[in-house]
Image (spheres, rainbow, N blue to C red):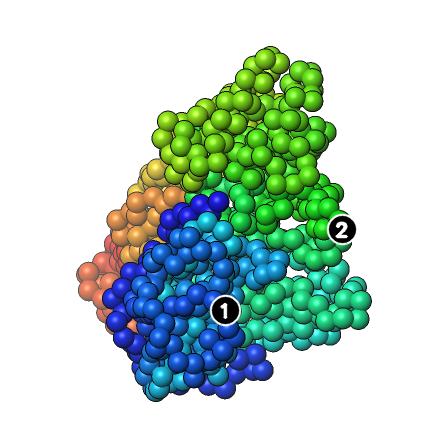
Amino acid sequence: MNHHVPRRRLAAITAVAAVAASLCIAVPASAAPSAPTTAVSANSAAAANSVSLDLAGTWKFAKGDDPSYASPDFDDSAWQDITVPGDGTPFADYDGFGWYRLTFTLPAGAEGTNLVASLGFLDDVDEAFLNGQRIGGSGTMPPAASSQWFEKRLYPVPADAPNFGGENTLAVRLYDMNGGGGWYEGPVGIYSKDAVRANVYGITGARATAAQSTAVAKVLETQKKALAAGDVDAYLKTLDKGYFHDGRSKERRARELRDWMKESGSLTLADSEVEVVTGENGSLIVDTNRAITGTRDGEPYTYQPASQQFLHIDATTLRETGNDSRFFRETVDSDLEGQPREFATYLPPSYLSQPDREYPVVYLLHGINGGSREWEPRDIDDVLDGLWKQGLAESIVIMPDGESLWYSDQPDGGTPWRSMFLTEMVPLVDKEYRTLEGRDFRALTGVSMGGFGAWSLGLSNPGMFSSIASHIGSLSYSGSTLPTPLTQVDGLSTKQLKKFDYYFDACEFDEYRFDDAARSMDTKLTEKGVPHTWAVYPEGRHNDACWMPHLKDSFGMHSSHFRDAGLREDFVKPEISAPASTTVRFGARFDALAGVTARDTVDGDVTASLKVRGTVDTTKLGTYTLRYVATDAAGNRARVDRVVTVAPAALTVGTPSISGTAKVGSALTAKPGAWTKGAALTYQWMRDGAPIRGAVTATHRLTASDAGARISVRVTGTLTGYTTAAKTSAATAKVAKGSLSATTPKITGSAKVSKTLTARAGTWTAGTRLSYQWLNGGKPISGATKATYTVARGDRGDALTVRVTGSLSGYETTSRTSGAVRIAR
């Protein structure tokens, strides 16, 4: 019952192989510098070679099994020709061993390149040899055969295995367990890691620089030394705070390493074939084959088997951030089985973005000859993502590896699978992931043998599960000692059966007649009055084409069940639209809710729910913090803080003007204009734009210093809560000189020869400097320039006058002449 399915993730490399008829080597321009102990390929010629060697085509094939078939010296000329991949004829009516061999040439020039042998898909078990050296295998060979028909074969090629520049022999040993078998799908070839990385995993970043590769090597070396020294804390320092890698947060990784340390004391971390490329958002992606080993009970033990991993490292902090993967392989370290048991984990899209949300769990069980890895080529993560987009309830999906054990405990000391599942795997899932507690949020879906498992596990454990679904399920056949689901239903009461919701289906042309089993189950449940949903589809056989299109129906039933049980799905907080900071003016009206909105992607506009904590007093300058809280219908709350600054208001500023005459000695008066009521005004008179010392009142008397200058006044207003403002008036015309205040002088004394006459100047402007000139008949008397004059003989009979001249800085010079005095003869 092998259900071959398309494999999208390998389609791209198939295209590469189809056009690569020969080895292609791209030779780089530079060589790499020396690196720390952990070797990291950077820009060396070997590291940068890109190899794509297509090996699909005609191979040699023979049935049977002989170790000598792996040797390059074995003569296979008598073997039949076979087309690889695709020709399953030898296994159409044959179950057992078969060998494939191909001899080919690897040209010289690719030495040192990290190579991968891609063998595509083989049914059921295989191991591969290059030049006689085993390079990998999938599944378990007889006697305890275990199929890995669903596993893509990508085997790292050891550096000493290829023969560059000469012939090479690739030999593949295959074991077909039952049904059809053989090498059914490619791509088949030898590829460098960069080709595999780009075409299988979609990682197409450029090679890291030598400096970046060296920095990464130091990080890997730090991790290696930390585990060797038993220092988990030192290892954790290389991880980013938000680290999440294949289901492991930083905290879980710490617990895991400490548990291993308790057993082993120290651990050996080994990285090989390390290559570093650039990723998105400035990250570095480290492509490495990584393993962690130690000891358990004194014996060597592998804690983390060697596998290709892609470590994501922040290029700035050089801390490992994790891959944020939502679909990955996981193991439970089973004490019951004495070894790790693998399972695949799928986390829904919101898991990483909504850290407070808890989810229901669906356990998805595979068919016979299957395993937990068969879901990868089915792209089950994309399928599940699509279901949620159709409105189904997001769930965590766990896909255990049930081998072909019929999800039961094997008799006679065999594998206790069911006990491991119920007591170790389910509790581990609940411990490590954010699952909802209780049976109401735990469901089972199974395919074929997994359908048997879903019914058997569910009906036998009503305290753990509450929703059961099967596709093309084995309801009428049990490959174990346990009863079939049909038999179980016969033995349960209606009350017991109604504890579950049910979905089951089959297809009309099922080779195992599981369609009849589905009809029987419908009849039994109907007779007992148990609600259920079922279908037998008119098209399809016992394969993926029958059941996969209906996965939405089984998960749709689980979704309705979870919601009926009260599943809370809305964990999306509203988004509040409010400015981070706001400035309001003193005394202004402020409405804290004006313009603030809140919206939720589920509930729409939730602005009405907004509450504001804090107040703003616009009559007091300062900074205030408001907190807005919005709550949606599901109780999700969002909080946003807003800083409001009450800043000084702007004063109404008047336009100053000046009244008065711009003349020395005159007084000018400032008219301030209209200012905000209550503003205190101050004045500063300006002379040609420069402040006049002491001139700080509303009036200013012009002095001699002002003469010839232009006078203005600057008025400054202040008021509490307002920004101080100032405005300067227009300047006056140039200040004119002043006019002296003067009176007409008088002459006193006896108007006779030899007598002294005195000039009485009268009242003049204070500070005026006076000078005198006596005149005879209107003409100046030489030397007569004092306030007194002694009459000379030549003055007899003449009329004498005196002219008084006043001068003062900033004033026009002024003269006044007295009346005449006649001198006696």
Coordinates of residue 365 in the picture (x, y in percent)? 56, 41
Residue 305 visible within the image: yes
Q: Is residue 166 above or below residue 495?
A: below
Query: Which element carries disc 2, helix, strand or loop?
Result: loop
* Residue at left offset 44%, top offset 45%: 3
Where on the picture, by quarter, is residue 248? Answer: bottom right
Left or right side of 449 for 651: left
Left of 687 or right of it: where is 492? right
Q: Is residue 204 above or below residue 472?
A: below
Residue displayed at 80% across by 71% down:
298
Residue indicated by mark 2: 413
Amino acid type at image mark 1? Asp
Quadrant position of residue 709: bottom left
Residue 648 in percent (x, y) is at 50, 38
Q: Is residue 103 left or right of residue 422?
A: left
Earlier along the polypeptide chain: callout 2 or callout 1? 1
Circle 2 crowding by C-alpha within 10 Å: few under 14, some 14–19, many from 20: few
Image location (x, y in percent) of residue 46: 40, 82
In this rendered view, identify the residue nearer to me: 99 or 243: 99
Q: Residue at x 19, y 60 (%)?
A: 778
Count residues near mark 1 (Cα–Cα under 10 Å), then give few for <14, some for 14-19, many for 20+: some
Task: Give the numbered dot on residue 65.
Answer: 1
Where residue 697 appears, x then y in whole percent?
47, 43
